[in-house]
Image: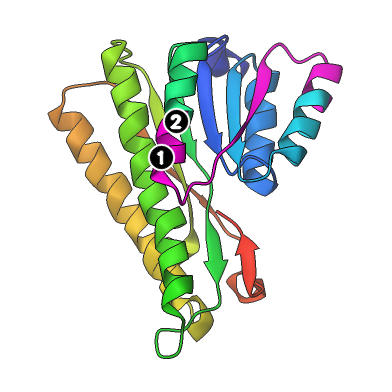
């Protein structure tokens, strides 16, 4: 692990949904291994606390909290612009942010469905596009785009409350495979990976941030 991470020391990673859970854990590990990590969320209080903890622990990297509502494309674009100005650009993009609402297909609210699409699908696609463009314009040929997915992106669960959520995660699976094809066609060594977590789906409350 140490040898694998050595080449990333001093380079820039974006982690979406970095305030809690998987996002916070990933951000911490990357900072520990010497990366400059931009951690974004709608509320950055917890990221600021994590940044202070990383600094106190003497980690060689840095965690930079950034407030961003991933439902708003303008805010995403502003974030990438700020990263370019302050840190040259993104070398690693970890699309971790995601959420679930209990909104069945037969009785769910359009607002709930749209919110899941905005965060789980569109924000991921926008961040992927902008990260790739950031790498391309700086001739970064060894970048990495990682999409955090769930088992709900590979199988439908028997709970009606989660069917639309699963549909958005199936989209993540499809987009990651499509991204791999486009990167091959672009003849770049930038990698696309999907990482799957296995949280128990039946325990999703009405509204929960998750990956």
Q: Is residue 203 magenta?
A: no
The residue positioned 41% from the left and 67% from the top of the image is 114
Residue depicted at 56% across the width and 17% down the height: 5
Q: Is residue 77 above or below residue 57?
A: below
From where the camera sits, is residue 146 visible?
A: no
Residue beneath the point at 63% across and 75% down: 206
The residue closer to the viewer here, 133 or 168, is 133
Q: Identify the magenta region.
A: 53-78
Query: How far across and how far down the image is residue 146, in percent?
Result: 44, 37
In this view, the residue farthest toward the bottom is 106
Above or below: residue 150 compared with residue 108: above
In the rendered image, which quarter is residue 9 located in?
A: top right
Q: In the figure, residue 156 lies in which quadrant?
A: bottom left
Q: How is the image coloured?
A: rainbow
Q: Secondary structure at mark 2?
A: helix
Q: Is residue 49 visible?
A: yes
Q: Which mark is residue 78?
A: 2
Residue 78 relative to residue 19: left or right:
left
Q: Is residue 195 above or below residue 102?
A: above
User: Outermost residue toward the left?
Assistant: 185
Magenta residue check for 61: yes
All told, the count of numbered labels is: 2
- Label 2 to label 1: alpha-carbon separation: 6 Å
Q: Can you tell which mark lies on residue 74?
A: 1
Label drawn at residue 8: none
From the viewer's perspective, is residue 42 above or below residue 155?
above
Q: Are marks 2 and 1 in contact (CB under 8 Å)?
A: yes
């Amino acid at each position: 692990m140490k040898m694998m991470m050595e080449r990333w020391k001093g380079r820039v990673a974006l982690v979406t949904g970095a305030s809690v859970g998987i996002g916070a854990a990933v951000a911490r590990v990357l900072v520990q291994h010497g990366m400059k990590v931009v951690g974004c969320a709608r509320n950055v209080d917890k990221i600021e606390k994590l940044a202070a903890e990383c600094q106190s622990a003497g980690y060689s990297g840095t965690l930079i909290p950034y407030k961003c509502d991933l439902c708003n494309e303008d805010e995403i674009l502003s974030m990438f612009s700020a990263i370019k100005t302050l840190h040259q650009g993104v070398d690693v993009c970890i699309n971790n942010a995601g959420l679930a609402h209990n909104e069945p297909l037969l009785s769910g609210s359009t607002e709930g469905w749209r919110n899941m699409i905005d965060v789980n699908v569109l924000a991921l696609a926008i961040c992927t596009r902008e990260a790739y463009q950031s790498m391309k314009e700086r001739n970064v040929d060894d970048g990495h785009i990682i999409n955090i997915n769930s088992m709900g992106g590979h199988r439908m669960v028997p709970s009606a409350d989660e069917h639309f959520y699963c549909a958005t995660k199936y989209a993540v699976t499809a987009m990651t495979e499509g991204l791999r094809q486009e990167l091959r066609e672009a003849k770049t060594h930038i990698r696309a990976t999907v990482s799957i977590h296995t949280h128990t789906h039946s325990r999703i409350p009405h509204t929960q941030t998750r990956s």
